[in-house]
Amino acid sequence: MKVCVGLSGGVDSSVAALLLKQQGYDVFAMFMQNWHDTEGTLHGDCEWEEDKFVAELVARKIGIPFYFVDLSKEYRQRVVDYMFDEYARGRTPNPDVLCNREIKFDAFLKKAREMGADMVATGHYCRKEQAPDGSWKLLEGIDPGKDQSYFLCQLDQEQLSRALFPIGGLLKSEVRALAAEADLPSADKKDSQGICFVGKVDLPVFLQQKLRSVEGDVVEVFDAWYGDSEKYQADSVLVGKARREGWETLSDAELAELATPLDYSDIQFETETYRSGKKHIKKTRYKANPHGVIAGRHDGAQFYTIGQRKGLAIGGHANPLFVIATDIDANRVYVGEGEEHKGLFRSVLRVAPEELHWVRQEHEMPLGAVRRCRCRIRYRQELQDATLLMRSAGLFVCFDRPQRSITPGQFAAFYALRDPSDPYDAPELLGSGVI
């Protein structure tokens, strides 16, 4: 069997290629370039030229052919343009999930197939397994600290049928050890932390290539607002009812209300004039508001995301400030003080019907279905117990515990419950959808 390894220059894909070669596969490596522009990219961090050089050295060391493919046009059209569009709407996309669905296991796979490959292998920490009906399961990797199945949550059966994950059954420490033993040039290379095949970026600078900077207010929301908010109080009552009687007892309208983020637009500020100093110079200031205060300024609401802490540059607080909401139309960013601020937590999210993806047909939920599962809304988040409800408005994910920083545009991934009798059981990824 002929296998094309997507060799990135990192240790994970290098060991994937090494293992396949040792297992007797007919292996060749291909490095993909997905980005040309340098604006917004932090110089010296994961630059593609260096990665390509290391990847070529690895292929030479292993003794496999090495090729190069430029997919920058496809990447811009399918990933970057989507990113810009989502941020412009005040949403936060996940480019790595899109890169796997649209590039690695689509555009890259097609190139590999044109070169005679039967399968494409990557260095992802995840596994696949064939079900009795012949379909392919996508499972978590063995290493709980490195599982990357979340990034593959949008793959379909055709893509999985052509995919190999040689290191999914290994721990990261074992991968490092294998690379060192084989004296691979990537053995000590640090893991990439940037956008998939673009590198580490200054996101606001990167986004400013297309999105205009416009100054606006940063509004800090006080705890008193939640005490006076009818929606917040009503939501709390509904959540309490659901926890007592079951999420399935809520109507479609009640679930939709819980899945709707809080709206802080009613926090307005009136001005007043006063006289200051010995000369009684007339000045203007904002009247005190028990619900909030204008705490600072920002360069554009579209550059901020829910749960963000860095980049606010607002001092004078005992605890850090976190972004709890953005209003693109009003160009406002709302923040709250402390990790336990009420505005950071929600119990329900919704995935629209057209955004829902099931890895296997067997897992599709008919209208009215209820399923217990575990869910994550970001990479490396521990799986959270939840109830899935399929309603006419889409799939509602109802968490046993309120979740921090549920962010529109991100992906929610759903996993089967773990078998408590099997300590080595790795949950199957059932499906996913855009929040």
Image: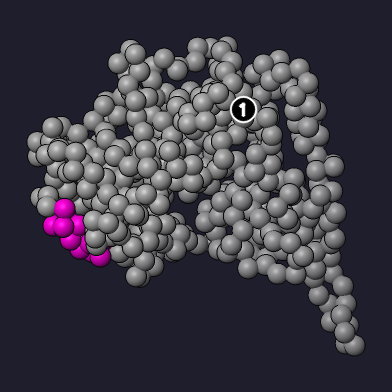
x 45%, y 46%: residue:
146
x 55%, y 55%: residue:
304
Q: Is residue 146 above or below residue 356?
A: below
Q: Nearer the viewer, residue 419 or 138?
A: 419
Name the dominant secondary structure of the magenta segment. helix
Which quadrant of the figure contains the N terminus? Answer: top left
Question: Can you see residue 371?
Answer: yes
x 78%, y 21%: residue:
244
Q: Residue 272 placed where, x, y %?
A: 84, 65
Q: Is residue 125 above or below residue 254?
A: below
In the rendered image, residue 352 lying in the magenta stretch gets the answer no
Residue 201 horizontal side relative to residue 377, left or right: left
Tell which residue pokes out farthest to the front in this image. Answer: 181
In the rendered image, residue 60 lying in the magenta stretch gets the answer yes
Q: Is residue 73 above or below residue 120?
A: below
Q: Residue 319 placed where, x, y %?
A: 74, 62
Query: Tell me, what colour scheme is on the image?
Result: one colour
Q: Nearer the viewer, residue 128 or 170?
A: 170
Residue 234 horizontal side relative to residue 334, left or right: right
Look at label 1 and name its amino acid: Ala
Is disc 1 placed on a helix, strand or loop? strand
Q: Residue 122 placed where, x, y %?
A: 28, 43
The quadrant holding residue 134 is top left
Q: Residue 322 placed where, x, y %?
A: 66, 55
Residue 427 horizontal side relative to residue 397, left or right: left
Q: How would you rate the neighbour count of disc 1 (Cα within 10 Å): few for under 14, some for 14-19, many for 20 or more?
A: many
Q: Which residue is mark 1?
A: 386
x 57%, y 40%: residue:
382
Residue stretch in magenta = 48-62
